[in-house]
Each structure stands twice: as C-alpha cells, then as structure tokens.
Amino acid sequence: MGAPQQTPNVDEIVSEIRIAAPPACVFQALANSSQVVHWWGQAGIYRCTKFESDLRVGGTWRAIGLDGNGRHFEITGEYLEVEPPRILSSTWVATWTGNAKTKVRWELEPFDRGTLVRIRHSGFKAHPELAQAYRGWPRMLGWVQALLEKGETVDQRKPASRT
C-alpha cells in the first residue's frame, strides 16, 4: 500500500505504514504467537524464532531469535495496553541494550482500504545512545505488510546482502 515512514524525535521513534488489511487482521499479526514468527525477520539481519504472549494488561511477552551473525537474542516486555483491534503497547527490554526499558505502542487506525499502522517506540530521552539501535522499525512494518498483503513469510523472503 505504501512505503514505511519514520519521524525523528528526541524521546520517540515513530514509524507508520498503510496496510491493505482490516485492523483486526493487523492486530492478530502483531499479537498472535504463530503469526509473529512468520513475519518477524529476514536471513542476514535477524529473525524471531519463538514468540510467547500472555495477551492482557499486566501479561508478559517474549521474543527469542537469532541476529544476522547467528547470535541468540531475547526481547521481553509487559503489556501496558491491550485494546483489540486499535492499541497494543508494552515495555521493551532487549538483550542488545542491557537493562534499558523502553516502551513500544502500536496504533491501528482504519482507513478506506485497510489500516494505518503507527508504531511509537519511546523512552530514549533517558537512553539517547539506544535510539540508533532501533532504526529498523520501517523494515519491520514492511515485513508485516508483506505477510498480510502478499502472504510472504520469513522463509520466503530473500536473504539480506551483507556489505
């Protein structure tokens, strides 16, 4: 539908994309354990191999995977808002950023041919050195779009070239 957009900010990274799928389908792609592992990743960059989720406010989630060099990573969080099919937010703690806790908020807005998906990753004012590590949100939005619009999975995606 459209290319991902990213807006710079001191405390928050905001990216958005239009996806030709209803908000309920997009919400499921973001929250359903079996769907997340189908879109989250690309060979040569990183890949989520396991996703666990207790989808309720106060519930926890965990993503486990491999980075582009084959090293294991883990991301954990606690759900702060769960309002299907509009809002999903949680804390975010990743192994590559130590104990730094940030917040990720997915906002889904219906539009005439699908869903405007906006992700807000905040908490960088306290950790400005981490913002560079999270420039990949537009890529991730593109992966969700590819799954929902074309049925493309991680396994079908062409590996990223290493430069």
Image (cartoon, grey):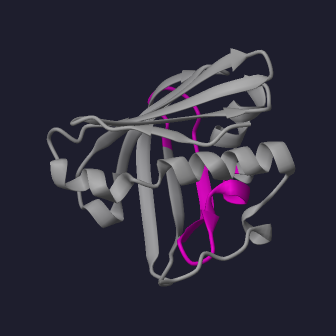
Residue 47, position as x, y percentages in the image = 58, 68
Is 36 above or below relative to 28?
below
Q: Which residues are magenta?
A: 36-60
At 53% from the left and 30% from the top, the residue drawn is 118
112 or 118, which lies in front?
112
The answer to whether residue 99 is left or right of residue 26 is left
Judged left or right of residue 132, residue 112 is: right
Task: Report which quarter residue 159 is drawn in.
Answer: bottom right
How many numbered marks have been drawn onto this rendered protein structure? 0
Residue 98: where, in percent of width, then height? Answer: 24, 61
Q: Residue at x 55, y 28 (%)?
A: 56
- 146 or 87: nearer the eye? 146
Q: Position of residue 92 (x, y in %)?
A: 37, 45
Q: Residue at x 80, y 69 (%)?
A: 156
**In this rendering, is residue 117 above or below 53?**
above
Residue 37 location, x and y as percent? 68, 58
Q: Is residue 69 above or below residue 101?
A: below
Q: Quadrant of the N terminus?
A: top right
Image point (34%, 64%), residue name: 95
Residue 45 forms part of the magenta stretch: yes
Q: In the image, is 87 to the left or to the right of 135?
A: right
| Residue that protrudes farthest toward the left in the picture | 126
Q: Is residue 155 above or below residue 28?
A: below
